[in-house]
Image: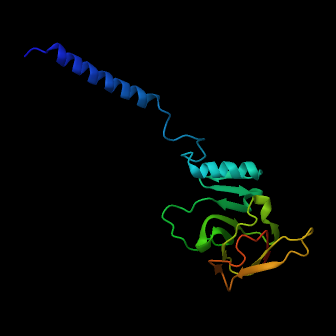
Amino acid sequence: MATTPRQWSRSATVLAAIIAIVALVAAAPPATAGPPDGPVSPGAVQVEIDKHLAAYPGGRQIGPTEISYAGGSFVLTFEPPVGTLASPDCTSGWFCFYDRINYGYPRGRLSSCGWQDLASWGWHDRTESVHFNISSGSVSYLNHTSAGHGGDPYLFSVSASARTDNDVSPYRNMADHVNRYC
């Protein structure tokens, strides 16, 4: 059976389309980009991390969803691990504060004793729920309202005997400082 010019034309058109598609796919940027030790995909979380580091320098990205400051003393996690339900999930030995009620992320995490300024790491006025996962002591959350810090009012606290608060209302988004009593 002989091939007609019309069949050749149709075959050539299909072949040209396949070659064009292959060329487009080959020229497309890779699906994963970024530094080898950084996040695999430059998605929305990476954009937030980049913005945060630009606004609050001195931090270092330590994983696809985390930044650390002060040599790892403060860790900011932008997204929970995949499959994690909204629950208090602070690592043992740390106290955590969440940007949403019911332990919604982003989450800040500290373990150091004493007074600390959350603004240093861009976490002032953004605590809505808390978890204290340390075997002793407590942490108080304070609001900065005066020129000095001596008059900063106490808002609320969590401790080894009262570890969680899923909604710090009426003090949502007011904590500027923490004071951990060891």
- With 150 as the anchor, is 140 left or right in this view? left
85 versus 76 height, above or below? below
Q: Residue at x 22, y 21 (%)?
A: 10
Residue 81 occupies quadrant: bottom right
Picture quarter with the C terminus: bottom right
Picture quarter with the N terminus: top left
Residue 165 vs residue 179, the one in the foreground: 165
Q: Residue at x 77, y 58 (%)?
A: 70
103 versus 163 height, above or below? above
Tally of marks? 0
**Colour scheme of this structure image?**
rainbow
Residue 130 vs residue 21, the one in the foreground: 21
Q: Residue at x 68, y 70 (%)?
A: 97
Q: Residue at x 64, y 52 (%)?
A: 48
Can you name the residue that lies furthest to the left here? 1
Can you name the residue that lies furthest to the front here? 6
Give the image location of residue 123, x and y in percent.
73, 63
- With 145 as the anchor, is 16 left or right in this view? left
Can you name the residue that lies furthest to the bottom here? 161
Give the image location of residue 180, x and y in percent.
78, 75
Give the image location of residue 130, x and y in percent.
66, 74
Give the image location of residue 135, x and y in percent.
68, 80
